[in-house]
Image: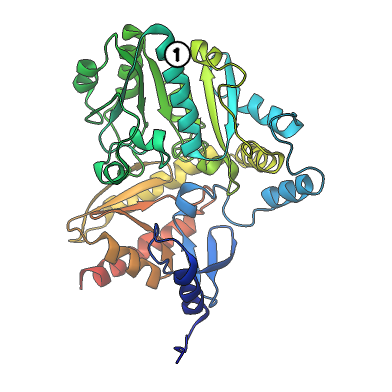
Amino acid sequence: MTAVVGTRTEALQARWSAVMLGNYGLPPVALERGSGSTVWDVDGRAYLDLLAGIAVSSLGHAHPAIAEAVARQASTLVHTSNLAMHEPGIELAERLAAMVPAPARVFLCQDGATANEAALKIARKRGNLVGRHRVVSTVGGFHGRTAGALAVTGTPAKREPFEPLPGGVEFVAYGDVQALRDAVDASTAAVILEPVQGEGGVVLPPPGYLAEARALCDAAGALLVVDEVQSGIGRAGSWLMSVDQGVVPDVVTLAKGLGGGMAIGAVIATGEAAEVLAPGDHGTTFGGNPVACAAALAVIRTIESEHLLDHVVAVGERWSASFDALDHPLLAGQRGVGLWRALELAEPVAPAVEVAAREHGFLVNAVRPGSIRLAPPLVLTPDEADSFSAALPAILDAAGQ
């Protein structure tokens, strides 16, 4: 006898379980539509989306600028392959290259993992040319789940089931300048790190860490690859965190919020790194397609026209102050930058907090057993931010029961 399924969500969960591979857990919600920072599930329940598809939906949901740009481009040209060029791709590359204060070249791809794969190929080819074969990465860092990106991801639980992976990688403690100093030498091809470790729990390094990494790479002749897949395009209140800190990387990788929900990634290479790849060295079938590029251009223009970088800083500071003012036994502290925050819990009950938040109408992420990640749309309003701050004590109470 077939079991009776009560809700549309449960019906979709049953269908999901029957056909999807097991690499994801069963999703607890089935979303149907969104507007701004709010989404609705298939059973009609509304949630304030404080995760934005893991820092992707930078302009929220159903933003008219993205919808119009995608519809207009899809009605004229969806795909070309890399055997032809198109205006949206060239304009997007020009806009991205202008984000670094140095001559730069751009490669457009599909997502953050493929951006980091391209960056690593630049580092490996250049390293082979000059006799350097080691890559230095950081413990707790995350750079993607493809083989090359996974090889430099500093979380053993993610790497070990898929070893052997590409070798020649050394991991050092994140934020530890002396550890970098000890690891980076004449055999180092590149250092890859994040300005803030997003999947690590929104972990910030000490002030000046990126600048120290830049100086060490310069002294050793190594490339500095900065993974801004999560930090870039407004998430921290700047186009690029590295450049905002006065650091020009050899290679920057981008994705997530760049497309506002459309699949796109990018590599920005400067100096010697910009001249490494030759025709045939790398490519992509779908990367940088006209529709995704049109969406990315709409994101960049909207961030500019609506002054969202300043907005992100202001609302982020407002949120930070409200969290600091909250006295609750389960809240041990908070950290972050812009609209990219982590609530540190006194006990490893983040999954329970995620469930309680959802029951109160908020989508958050238990990024670590004791950490809740918040990465809402950049258009989150002060009132929306305040609504979560006001509900947080009850959410923590429910999770602690």
On the image, which quarter does residue 278 sit in? Answer: top right
| Residue drawn at 21 percent across, 30 percent down | 173
- Is residue 98 visible in the rendered image? The answer is no
Q: Which residue is mark 1?
A: 126
Residue farthest to the front, as pictured: 164
| Residue drawn at 29 percent across, 12 percent down | 187
Left/right placement of residue 141 relative to residue 1 reads left
**Front-most of residues 96 and 184:** 184
- 349 in relation to 340, above or below: below
Q: Position of residue 265 (x, y in %)?
A: 55, 36
Q: Position of residue 312 (x, y in %)?
A: 48, 43
Q: Amino acid at mark 1?
A: Arg
Number of labels in the image equals: 1
Q: Position of residue 66 (x, y in %)?
A: 67, 48
Q: The C terminus appears in which quarter of the rendering? A: bottom left
- 155 in relation to 212, above or below: below
- 9 in relation to 226, above or below: below
Left/right placement of residue 78 relative to residue 221 reads right
- Is residue 259 visible in the rendered image? The answer is yes
Residue farthest to the bottom, as pictured: 1
Q: Position of residue 130 (x, y in %)?
A: 40, 7
